[in-house]
Amino acid sequence: GDSVTQMEGPVTLSEEAFLTINCTYTATGYPSLFWYVQYPGEGLQLLLKATKADDKGSNKGFEATYRKETTSFHLEKGSVQVSDSAVYFCALVERDSNYQLIWGAGTKLIIKP
Amino acid sequence: NAGVTQTPKFQVLKTGQSMTLQCAQDMNHNSMYWYRQDPGMGLRLIYYSASEGTTDKGEVPNGYNVSRLNKREFSLRLESAAPSQTSVYFCASSEIPQGGYTFGSGTRLTVV
């Protein structure tokens, strides 16, 4: 079945460092891919998405490119801030399905001043 | 611009008590979902409703029931609460899953 694998956390970085959080997936069809963010004590928010191969999703300085050849959707940001500290979830849904999202386990990001 | 509204935000129950978690969305979305989030377990789907009038089991439905009251509202009921149901519960909605979900702010439930 479909699955999403994320790098284990926590990931600890200093402010202004470069961020990469790895996400790889297995899917039988042509999924849409998502990154969600969960700040402490809050619900999940959609951060960015990509619906087809080579699409780049971007928001709030974060980017991720849909790489079909490597089945990956890695999250990147050039210069992180303390306010980026949160848990980040990668997820997919098959394009021709009305089923629910398939979720990664989440990666906790800690940014130190 | 409320999005998805969940009530209550916090609840403490005694083992065996029942309660209903309420969820309402104002975005005219077709699909709605109930998840639970536990430390180290990520998000697990309890039930979902692909459209008004339909409900289906997710990954962990035992001990729960749901009602899709209308297009806006999707409630989750615990008939006889157990300590294993201590968790944070999230409701979400989507027009289509491929468009992404909008989440509520969650209900933190403790069963003692």
Image (spheres, coloured by chain):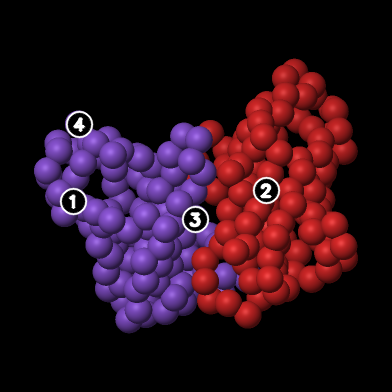
Chain colours: A red, B purple
Q: Nearer the viewer, mark 4 or mark 2?
A: 2
**What's the residue at 86%, 33% (across, down)?**
A18
Q: Quadrant of residue A83?
A: top right
- Is residue B9 left or right of A22 when viewed as pictured? left
The residue where tag 2 is placed is A5
User: Chain for mark 4?
Assistant: B
The residue where tag 1 is placed is B19
- Residue B39 sits above or below residue A48 on the image: above
Residue B34, given in percent of the width and then of the height, sits at 39, 58
**Closest to the observer: A80 or B62?**
B62
Residue B49, given in percent of the width and then of the height, sits at 39, 72
- Is residue A108 left or right of B52 when viewed as pictured? right
One can see residue A56 in this view? no
**Tag 4 and tag 1, C-beta contact below 8 Å:** no
Element type at marker 4? loop
Label 1: how many residues lie within 10 Å, few (<14), some (14-19) or many (20+)? some
Element type at marker 3? strand
Question: Which callout, 4 or 3, points at the residue further toward the start of the chain?
Answer: 3
- Residue A27 sits above or below residue A6 on the image: below
Give the CA distance from mark 4 to mark 1.
Answer: 14 Å
- Residue A39 sits above or below residue A58 on the image: above
At label 2, which amino acid type do we have? Thr
Q: Nearer the viewer, mark 4 or mark 1?
A: 4
